[in-house]
Image (tube, grey):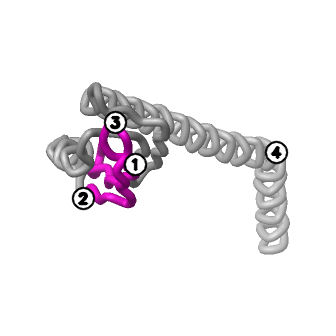
Amino acid sequence: MALYGNWSQRQYLQQIQAQIDGLEPMRKRADTLERQAQQARARAQVLDNFRQQTKKDLEALNELTRLIEFPAWTNNIVMNRGDVRLGGETQQTSSMVKLLDASSYFERTEILMSNPSGKGEVFQIRANRRSGK
């Protein structure tokens, strides 16, 4: 009887193992699909972040357009996530610094270069972008 019990138990364990082995391809496929879903979520998040940052960049550029009025003009604008660098001509560079610092988009503006020209001053300015802007 004990011998039959051991044999029966082994048979039962073999049947369970066969069922587990039969489900293994589905488990592997589920793992693969989960990895692919995680990758798709990560790509979607990158695209969403990019869209949000692009909107912020355009808003900052629009603010510069609003702030820099005639007779001032720029011939160079370089913007990245942390700051903006402007080059151009204005009647008084120090007034540009005050304008940019008064904006909710920029802070800690500094004059990199300011030289007198025929109608005002040629300037290069750097301003930090405010956090979240």
For the residues carrying marks 4 and 2, which lies nearer the camera in this image?
2
- Report if the CB atoms under discs 3 and 2 are less than 8 Å apart: no
Measure the alpha-carbon separation of dots 4 and 2. 60 Å
Q: Disc 1 marks which amino acid?
A: Val
Magenta part of the chain: 109-133
x then y, percent, for residue 97? 23, 50
Q: In screen coordinates, is 100 left or right of 127?
A: left
Q: Disc 4 marks which amino acid?
A: Pro
x then y, percent, for residue 95? 19, 45
Numbered disc 2: secondary structure: strand
In magenta stretch: residue 129: yes
For disc 3, the neighbor class at 10 Å (few under 14, some 14 to 19, many from 20) is many
Q: Which mark is residue 108?
A: 2
For disc 2, the neighbor class at 10 Å (few under 14, some 14 to 19, many from 20) is some
For disc 1, the neighbor class at 10 Å (few under 14, some 14 to 19, many from 20) is some
Task: Identify residue for label 4.
Answer: 25
Task: Identify residue for label 3.
Answer: 60
- Report if the CB atoms under discs 1 and 3 are less than 8 Å apart: yes
Overall secondary structure of the magenta section: strand
